[in-house]
Image (cartoon, rainbow, N blue to C red):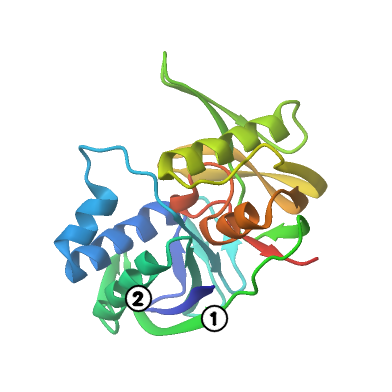
Amino acid sequence: MYQFKILFRLEKNFLPREMDRLMISFLKSATQQYSQDFYDALYDKSKSIIKSYVFSYYLPGARFCENKIELNKNEFTLFFSDADQIELLKFFNSFQKMRYRLYPIDGNSMQLVSIYMQKINEIQDNEIVIKFQSPLIVRSHNSMDNTDIYYTHEMAGFAETAKDNVRFFVKKLGIPVSVDDFSIEVIKGKKVVVPVFGRNVDASLGLFKLKGSCQLLNILLLAGAGARRSEGHGKFLVIG
């Protein structure tokens, strides 16, 4: 199993506060440059498409201001993984198309300068301790009135709703794996508020314990946990 470590160089040492908009725009541009068919398979607006990828960032010396993120270096790193390894290779080709191209940001620009493929150790236990690298969003969606309830780790219903999010994900992708024995338990959590397409959403960071089959846990390791994974949420690192 693998993930990409991607280095971006910035013209100036800041990024927009809403990183989800920036990175999704970049992914759409990259995939469309590579293949219109690949782009349509992921982002066709006429379809509801569940993605199997997730990403997180390393933002050196990040200072979160009202409208931007100030860094102490003119660079940042993206960590990108995908439960579909064939799709991951297509993303590699897409990213290669964007190397050294200046990509505009409001009042700034970024440039993809390097891509490294990193091996990820396969999970071989049914119980693991993880650290979230990007905020975990746990959402209960009411399709009748199109409203959402977001759960953080200290709220009643958090664990069951997180399990529902996992069940929805594997069912939509048609992955033949049971979610019945999945559970999530907070060890040391922190509530955070993250901007999601112009709206502030409650989320969680910290250390958690996950239980489930090895097959399921490995899928989540590559695809992320919770909701809005493909917008840069729910990526985690196994620490024990």
Please tell me which residue is depicted at 70% across the width and 42% down the height of the picture.
182
Amino acid at pointer 1: Gln
Q: Nearer the viewer, residue 59 or 214?
A: 214
Question: Quadrant of the rendered structure where residue 203 is?
Answer: top right
Q: Name the residue under label 2.
A: 92
Amino acid at pointer 2: Phe
Q: Nearer the viewer, residue 20 or 161?
A: 161
Q: SS at mark 1?
A: strand
Question: Quadrant of the rendered structure where residue 226 is?
Answer: top right
How far from the left and from the top, in percent, is residue 55?
50, 62
Please tell me which residue is depicted at 46% across the width and 68% down the height of the picture.
14
Q: Are marks 1 and 2 in contact (CB under 8 Å)?
A: no
Circle on res. 208? none
Q: SS at mark 2?
A: helix
Q: Mark 1 points at which residue?
A: 118
- Residue 147 can be seen in this image: yes
Q: In this view, does 235 lie above or below 101?
A: above
How far from the left and from the top, in percent, is residue 232?
49, 55
The quadrant the N terminus occupies is: bottom right
How far from the left and from the top, in percent, is residue 228?
48, 44
